[in-house]
Image (spheres, helix red, strand yellow):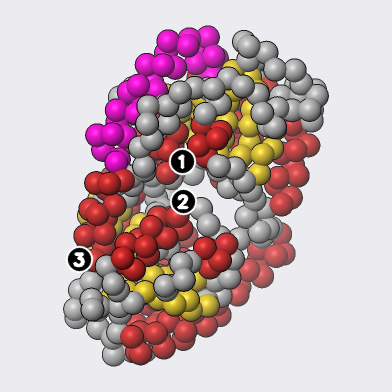
Amino acid sequence: MSDPLLFVAHTGERSGAEKVMLMLVDVALAQGRRVVVACPDGPLADALPAGCVRVRLPRLGMWGQRGVGRIAGLAGLPVRWLVGARRLRRVLSAERPRVVCNSLFALPSLRLAVLGTSHCERAGWLVHDTLSSRKQRIVARMGRGAVGGAVAVSRASAVPVRECGYPVVVAPHGVPIPPVPSRSTSPDASTPEDSTPDASTVRVGILASVTEWKGHRVLLEAVAEVPGIRLDVAGEPFPGDEAFLDELRRRAHAPDLRGRVSFLGRVDPAEVFAVWDVMVSASTSPEAGPLVALEAMAHGVPVVGTDHGGTAEHLADGAGLLVPPGDAKALAEALRRLMSAPDLRNDIAVTARRRVEERHDIEVTLPAMVNALWATGVTS
């Protein structure tokens, strides 16, 4: 049997990064490997396949705390990193696995765990973040001694990791490519109760965790400036972000938006892509390579995204429209442009799907990512 594999995640939530990790776990199990996943409690732990072993970690990062709670959370980080390190150290000593670190904020625990064990193979780090803040760069440097190499999901995410001293290769995300999509215009349960569907209405959606940096505030302000748009907000808040969702709901009930915004919660992406005319990726901090943008592109939904990080790479050269991050007026103008030009929406959709077929087919990208990650361990 091949060497055992240990996957390490800092959060128990389940967003794009954890979705990718679960695919990698499935690949490892299919290869006949013993798989151990170390992560906190939450939806990620609940989604682990039966064939792997789970090690419980404390939360190794922050999770939406505000005010005094945020100060307490930051103060408790070193303790949680130490607790995580002890639990990881036991796995490293007993299993002597190859290690895949799926999270920036798991790196400090992994570094502390390696210091206390004779395990000598350093981890591969799958980079899901574009290190845009001083805090992120500090955490990355803290983990340097535990990592043999990094695999970044975009060129934009590779640059700051390389600047922190890591050897980096790029292995882009991929998504399944559905049959050529057929667009539906039928209203469904997401229609606001106090609105009447109109054939001329353009349906815009955002599919993202409901947390501040995903840009929901900016999107609501943009939609408020463009009559004739109905907005679907799909996704759920992380623990600690419930107050932010309440804030968005209050804004959506203001006169300039009332009756035009629906909050869908958790959805099947294929179902909303079948009815959306446009999807928006409005993140105010750069994303490494948003899966949801690729999924929308594969389904023939034109995407408006913020012009930084992996989003800019996905949507370059006519595969989408790019706007400055945090700029509600520019986003409103992009939505007006798409609203008034069905031919432009179609041209973007065709170009975007071709981009996914050529560069982001999961049948090609997932094996390439696996090969890159499995090769990153370095014996020292």
SS of the residue under disc 1: helix
- The residue indicated by pointer 3 is 375
The quarter holding residue 95 reads bottom left
Query: In the image, what residue occupies the spot 63% across and 32% down?
Result: 232
Horizontally, residue 203 falls left or right of residue 180, namely right
- Amino acid under label 1? Val
Which stretch is magenta? 335-361
**Label 2 neighbourhood size at 10 Å, few (<14), some (14-19), many (20+)?**
some
Q: Residue under circle 2?
A: 16
- In the image, residue 301 above or below residue 309: above
Q: Position of residue 332 (x, y in %)?
A: 57, 21
Distance in Å between CA atoms under marks 1 and 3: 27 Å
Specify which label sits upstream in the sequence, 2 or 3: 2
Disc with the residue nearer the chain's start (2 vs 1): 2
Q: Nearer the viewer, residue 366 or 221?
A: 366
Callout 2–callout 1 Cβ contact below 8 Å = yes
- Which of the labelled discs sits on residue 292, or is there none? 1
